[in-house]
Image: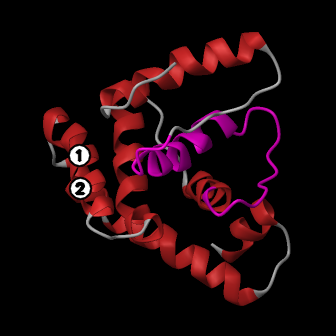
Amino acid sequence: MIGLLKKVIGDTDEKKLKKLEKLVNEVNSLSDEMSGLSDHDLAGKTENLKSRYQAGESLDDLLPEAFAVVREGADRVLGLRPYDVQVVGGIVLHRGDTAEMKTGEGKTLVATMPVYLNAISGDGVHVVTVNDYLARRDSEQMGELYRFLGLTVG
């Protein structure tokens, strides 16, 4: 997994890579739980996460579960299941860092995880893209996932 992480985030110190790997493993460990939920119960995770955030849990604390919710939701709604490397990209974006990805490697799907997580706070989340066509396309496609999970899309 370390080689895969180095490909996404570049050659950084081993300690950072281990932390990312640990978070991906936490997301993966929730896979069976999420897949066992009904659509209604999976979507209900959003309100649960919002309540926990309002009760004092940090977004970083909620990250593994939120990312697992999005991963399962994306599989059900879009027929796309983010790969581990895409989960890493989402973690990197959530932390405010840059993740370099080539055309076709799933940047739009990667963004769904940190967008969802940060929407838990109740603050608006904006996704910026390079042109109106991509903004409309991404809003329509990923909007299906966000609405399924109980978020609004504009």
Residue 119 — which label? none
Span highlighted in magenta in the image: 94-123
What is the C-alpha distance between the residues marked 2 and 1? Answer: 6 Å
Amino acid type of disc 2? Ser
Tell me if residue 2 comes above or below residue 125 in the rendering. below
Q: Is mark 1 on a helix, strand or loop?
A: helix
Q: Which residue is drawn at 60% across and 54% down?
A: 90
Residue that mark 1 sits on: 47
Q: Where residue 136 sits in the image (x, y, percent)?
A: 64, 12
Which residue is at the front of the view, 3 or 135?
135
Q: Where residue 125 sits in the image (x, y, percent)?
A: 56, 39
Position of the N terminus, as image quadrant, is: bottom right
Q: Residue at x 68, y 18 (%)?
A: 135
> Seen in the image, is 31 located left or right of residue 33?
right
The quadrant where residue 74 appears? top left
Q: Residue at x 16, y 49 (%)?
A: 36
Whether the residues at callouts 2 and 1 have beta carbons within 8 Å, the answer is yes
Decide whether residue 119 is among the magenta residues: yes
Q: Where residue 13 sits in the image (x, y, percent)?
A: 79, 86
Tell me if residue 52 comes above or below residue 22 in the rendering. above
Decide whether residue 104 is among the magenta residues: yes
Amino acid type of disc 1? Glu
Residue that mark 2 sits on: 51
Tell me if mark 2 has few (under 14), some (14-19) or many (20+) residues whose alpha carbon lies within 10 angstroms of its own.
Answer: some
Q: Is residue 119 visible?
A: yes
